[in-house]
Image: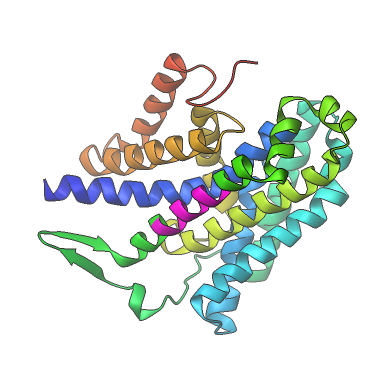
Amino acid sequence: MVNLIGVLFDGAAYGMLLFLLAVGLSVTMGLMGFVNLAHAAFAMVGGYALVTLASSLHFPFAAAVAGAALVAGLLGLVLESLVYRPLYRAKPLAQVLMTVGLIFVAMSVATFTFGPGQQAVDIPDGLRGRWAVGPFEFSRYRLLTVGVGLAVALAVLYALERTRAGAQIRAAVDNQKVAASMGIRVHLLFRLVFAAGSALAGMGGALGVEVFGLDPGFPIKYLIYCLLVVVVGGTGSVLGTLYAALGVGIADVAGKYYLPEAGAFVVYVLMMVSLLLFPNGLKGRAA
């Protein structure tokens, strides 16, 4: 029982980090219909920004995480204007090729700047060790990731469901042409949503350095997990992304714990079963 609770908790913490990485991709794909395979590169940028701010410049950890999210968001804002916008109406193949090219550019820049090895980050003493609750022990750092993930999910849901900007985003998701005819500045929404999604990916990458590790291969490895979460949850759905991320995280951790020889395949079996039952994703809509 103790081991099961520990596996579920570690899986949930892992899933919350996947949610932070993937929610921006889900929303931007649902809003823009843009196949951005370079999304995980923004998470890598956040990771390297955290390493630089926390370990090299000795920023407080919370400030370093916020700074990492800001750096990734600003980079997303710049690239949206210079690189992504001209391809919004391009065919999916052109979008895929361009964003795959961005992945390799990002990997090359990371290798040149930081080297090919794993990066380490200093975390505060208060986040080290475990917190005991009766017979159960929980990692303090993973408790932080769960708390941040839940806070971000609630904030994004509130922004989309309860604010004027959220109503405009939902209108643009339903029909861009009608939204534009009603005076909604769809292109400005695209920029803001893209920057916010990049910032959330940067935050996930920063918090994930301690759990995922960080090296120049990060965008390739975790792109697969981001796509799994988005496909299983349904594009454009925050709740679907959250449910899918938790499911993928728990399945991945449980599979590797209970079936170490075949654990890596458990998450893909889960994806296939989920898509057979829910072809449009857990919270997706029929086309």
> Where is the C terminus found, in terms of image quarters?
top right
- Image quadrant in which you'd find residue 86: top right
Horizontal side, residue 166 vs residue 172: left or right: left
Residue 154 falls within the magenta-colored stretch? yes
* Viewer-proximal residue among 14 and 217: 14
Q: In the rendered view, tell whether residue 80 sits above or below residue 50.
A: above
> Where is the N terminus found, in terms of image quarters?
top left
Is residue 245 visible from the viewing direction of this image? yes
* Residue 22 picture location, percent across and down: 56, 43
What is the tally of numbered marks visible in this picture?
Answer: 0
Bounds of the magenta span? Answer: 147-156
Tell me which residue sits at (62%, 33%) in the image.
236
Tell me which residue sits at (38%, 42%) in the image.
249
Q: Which residue lies furthest to the bottom in this view?
A: 58
Q: In the rendered view, tell whether residue 162 sits above or below residue 134.
A: above
* Viewer-proximal residue among 174 and 197: 174
Is residue 34 visible from the viewing direction of this image? no
- Image quadrant in which you'd find residue 132: bottom left
Horizontal side, residue 255 vs residue 39: left or right: left
* Residue 189 picture location, percent across and down: 78, 44
* Viewer-proximal residue among 213 and 113: 213
Tell me which residue sits at (39%, 19%) in the image.
273
Tell me which residue sits at (54%, 78%) in the image.
54
Horizontal side, residue 171 vs residue 204: left or right: right
Q: Which colour scheme is used?
A: rainbow
Residue 152 falls within the magenta-colored stretch? yes
* Residue 142 picture location, percent across and down: 35, 60
Q: In the rendered view, tell whether residue 33 sits above or below residue 116.
A: above
Q: Predominant secondary structure in magenta?
A: helix
